[in-house]
Image: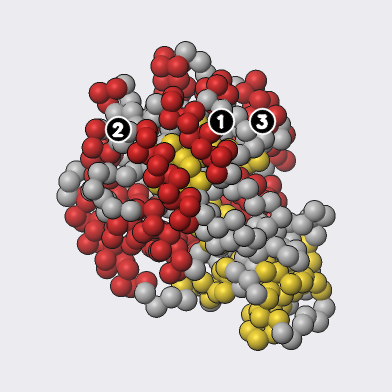
């Protein structure tokens, strides 16, 4: 028997190959996978969600985040500095994270994301202070307990201030230890099965915080283990200048010479590629996690998303860390992506459908899960978001439910379904642990912020 049916939708935006949008549509999910999608009378199911006056989309996919950073949100002395100065102000605070604070900040961060319709999130955990314990396992346990699909990346930093990098000594490690820990993390947690809830990627933090040798050896390890690669890339003008001054080349050439220019790689930000680099990124099959709010708050610039997509780059969406973007709503990022594309490339270039594609199909491609995530079609993962199109903000929005979704704004999902199981229902988190986790988070954030 069918496990869950979502029925009577005003529109089901499938994001399938034909981009079908089904008025009066339904979605059936069984054993964690989409069983069928259609119009008319759905199959009988154990559980039913009525989606009258709702838009149903694939669950949104967050392709870039630093979940622990919600412990230092909107931290006043740091909000007026661009990227490099901002990072150097915060490293000493972040050095105090441990397994408990990573568990709690991950749980709270993923809960926040789920309430904005996100069913799968990546996390770039590049900070592993000495003696802090197994932080990657802590965050994987939090995602598992909450029920959100998770792509943690085993990040790293190996180039400290004394060696010409950005971070302080106590948060960097040597290359051999990093590679051994990366391999151990993949062996322990990486699930290759269809519909997997946990997959691990390898993720040196950024060219300005790791050695070139670590970039090369990490790419070789990812190839051997058959896992994906992630890092920050061409994030702002400072980042490009650092690349030229330190490596004698622009960021794309650095990716190429370290073995990263491949379809195994997705990078975050990509604000400052030149026209030639855009073509080379597309030809190499590299994915890009577009982080519009973070790029705006740090005044980094506007990523050329429309041009990247035209060049064949798989563009996904990321909320980025909560210390730079502060809000971690994937719906909001989708709206920002739509607005910025209009501003940069003209009104017609930035549509709600483009933003929805980036937030679903694009994210799935970044994470190497095309056909499995980000689409509502039989066999895909049972990850769905249900958005209410009612209330004052939708009064008069009759013509186009997809454009209305991003222009008028439900801002939060009514129901968020992961693997056929509701994580958010009626706009409320299903787990009863939220209050308890927020109290714990408050205590940890206070402890860490006192270090500033
Ligand atoms: Zn980032």
Task: Identify whether 409 is placed above or below 260.
Answer: below
Find disc 1 in the rendering and name its residue: 260
Residue 378 located left or right of residue 314: right
* Tag 2 residue: 167
Q: Is 432 placed left or right of 410 in the picture?
A: left
Rendering coords of residue 364 (x, y %):
63, 51
Mark 2 falls on what kind of element? loop
- Residue at 36%, 46% (x, y): give it: 323
The residue at label 1 has a CB less than 8 Å from ligand 1: no
Q: Is residue 443 visible?
A: yes
Mark linked to residue 284: 3
Name the quarter where the N terminus is drawn: bottom right
Q: Is residue 289 above or below residue 440?
A: above
* Residue 142 x %, y %: 40, 64
Q: On the rendered image, what quadrant is the C terminus found in?
A: top left
Is residue 330 found left or right of 308 in the rendered image?
Answer: left
Distance from the alpha carbon under mark 2 to that under mark 3: 30 Å
Helix, strand or loop under label 3:
helix
């Amino acid at each position: 028997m069918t496990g869950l049916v979502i029925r009577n939708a005003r529109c089901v935006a499938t994001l399938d190959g034909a981009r079908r949008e089904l008025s009066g549509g339904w979605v059936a999910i069984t054993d964690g996978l989409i069983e069928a999608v259609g119009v008319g009378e759905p199959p009988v199911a154990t559980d039913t969600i009525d989606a009258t006056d709702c838009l149903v989309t694939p669950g949104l996919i967050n392709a870039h985040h630093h979940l622990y950073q919600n412990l230092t949100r909107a931290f006043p002395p740091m909000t007026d500095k661009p990227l490099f100065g901002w990072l150097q102000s915060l490293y000493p605070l972040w050095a105090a994270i441990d397994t408990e604070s990573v568990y709690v900040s991950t749980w709270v961060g993923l809960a926040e994301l789920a309430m904005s319709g996100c069913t799968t999130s990546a996390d770039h955990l590049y900070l592993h202070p000495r003696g802090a314990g197994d932080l990657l396992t802590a965050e994987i346990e939090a995602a598992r307990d909450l029920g959100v699909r998770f792509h943690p990346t085993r990040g790293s930093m190996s180039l400290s201030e004394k060696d010409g990098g950005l971070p302080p000594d106590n948060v960097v490690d040597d290359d051999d230890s990093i590679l051994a820990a990366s391999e151990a993390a993949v062996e322990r947690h990486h699930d290759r099965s269809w519909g997997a809830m946990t997959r691990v990627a390898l993720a040196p933090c950024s060219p300005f915080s790791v050695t070139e040798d670590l970039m090369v050896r990490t790419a070789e390890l990812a190839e051997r283990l058959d896992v994906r690669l992630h890092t920050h890339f061409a994030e702002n003008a400072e980042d490009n200048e650092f690349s030229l001054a330190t490596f004698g080349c622009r960021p794309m050439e650095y990716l190429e010479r370290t073995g990263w220019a491949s379809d195994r790689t997705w990078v975050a930000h990509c604000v400052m590629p030149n026209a030639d680099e855009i073509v080379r990124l597309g030809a190499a099959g590299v994915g890009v996690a577009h982080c519009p709010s973070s790029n705006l708050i740090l005044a980094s610039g506007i990523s050329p998303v429309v041009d990247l997509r035209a060049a064949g780059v798989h563009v996904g969406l990321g909320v980025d860390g909560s210390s730079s973007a502060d809000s971690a709503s994937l719906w909001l990022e989708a709206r920002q992506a739509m607005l910025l594309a209009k501003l940069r490339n003209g009104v017609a270039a930035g549509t709600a459908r483009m933003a929805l594609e980036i937030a679903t199909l694009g994210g799935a491609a970044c994470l190497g899960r095309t056909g499995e995530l980000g689409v509502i079609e039989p066999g895909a993962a049972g990850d769905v978001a249900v958005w209410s199109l009612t209330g004052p903000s939708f009064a008069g929005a009759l013509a186009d439910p997809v454009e209305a979704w991003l222009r008028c704004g439900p801002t939060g999902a009514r129901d968020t379904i992961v693997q056929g199981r509701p994580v958010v229902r009626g706009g409320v988190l299903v787990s009863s642990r939220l209050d308890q986790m927020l109290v714990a988070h408050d205590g940890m954030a206070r402890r860490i912020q006192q270090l500033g």
